[in-house]
Amino acid sequence: MPPAIKRDFTTEITTIKRTDMSNTQYAVCHLQRGSGNDSGMSCHIERKYPDGRKYVPVNADASWTHLNRELVRFPEGVSNRTEAIQNRIDTAGLRRKVGKNQTKAIRIILTGTHEQMMKIANDGRLDSWIDANLKWLKETFGEENLVSCVLHIDEKTPHLHATVVPIVTGERIRRKREGEKKYETKSGPRLSADDVMRRTKLHEYQNSYAAAMKPFGLQRGIVGSTAKHQANSEYYRQQVIQYEEDIAAYSGR
């Protein structure tokens, strides 16, 4: 692990306007299916176009971009996130051909309430927070499936962009619309975002992630509430949408 980031967040902390008088600090874990080989999102995450040109989103401070870092070591011969996704699929031992419309990657944004993330960073605990996140990701999705995890320090709130290839080994779950249709089940790994993104699984992720973040003063929000944590999650979802729009607008340059 590289040395702790020497960024002083004190000024940012003192200028925060408190809008939540309860002062509750929430963990944010947002999962989203990637599109195709997800090269568009790779552009945002790695801050460069496929041809190597620099890419700086409008909400990033370019003077801090050099502090961003990839936290997962790529296999030999793999040089970027997009290649890492394909490499995992190619080497997973899949027995079925990957469909054109199948989800190859799950995007995961991990962070917390802005004020608490600033405090974690300013207290010199950011690397410990990163380690806890990596541990949770590997235990939850499998170390081999975690193909990339990038720390972004050049945006408003420190956060991680993790990428998981949804390789599973359990028996395929029959969908209701399939009725009694029979299908061949084979042992071995499968590419299945549906399994990874099941509603019950998503609930489990939120619970286990909150438990992992508790030592950092972050907690899970109340299920079904309209508390601030939901606004945070929606904020990051909207960020992802904006990233994709920006990337699409500049992809031809």
Image (spheres, rainbow, N blue to C red):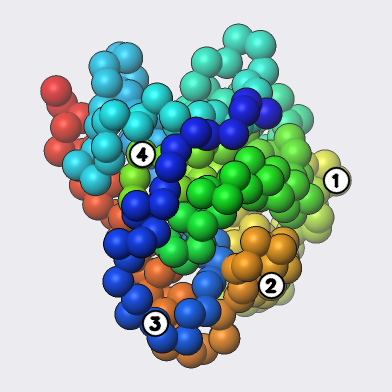
Q: Nearer the viewer, mark 3 or mark 2?
A: 3
Answer left or right for 248 relative to 219: left
Q: Are marks 3 and 1 in contact (CB under 8 Å)?
A: no
Q: Nearer the viewer, residue 210 or 178?
A: 210
Q: Nearer the viewer, residue 245 or 1?
A: 1
Mark found first going from the N terminus, 3 or 1: 3
Mark found first going from the N terminus, 2 or 1: 1
Q: Are marks 2 and 1 in contact (CB under 8 Å)?
A: no
Circle 2 residue = 207
Answer left or right for 186 relative to 245: right
**Mark 3: few, some, or many residues within 10 Å (few <14, many ≥20)?**
few
Mark found first going from the N terminus, 4 or 3: 3
Between marks 4 and 2, how big is the CA–CA gap?
Answer: 28 Å
Circle 1 residue = 187
Between marks 3 and 2, how big is the CA–CA gap?
Answer: 22 Å
**Outermost residue, top side:** 77
**Outermost residue, bottom side:** 225
Q: Nearer the viewer, mark 2 or mark 1?
A: 2
Circle 4 residue = 154
Q: Amino acid at mark 3?
A: Asp
**Mark 4: few, some, or many residues within 10 Å (few <14, many ≥20)?**
some
Q: Amino acid at mark 4?
A: Asp
Residue at image coords 62%, 73%: 219
Q: Amino acid at mark 2?
A: Asn
Q: Is residue 217 above or below residue 122?
A: below
Mark found first going from the N terminus, 4 or 2: 4
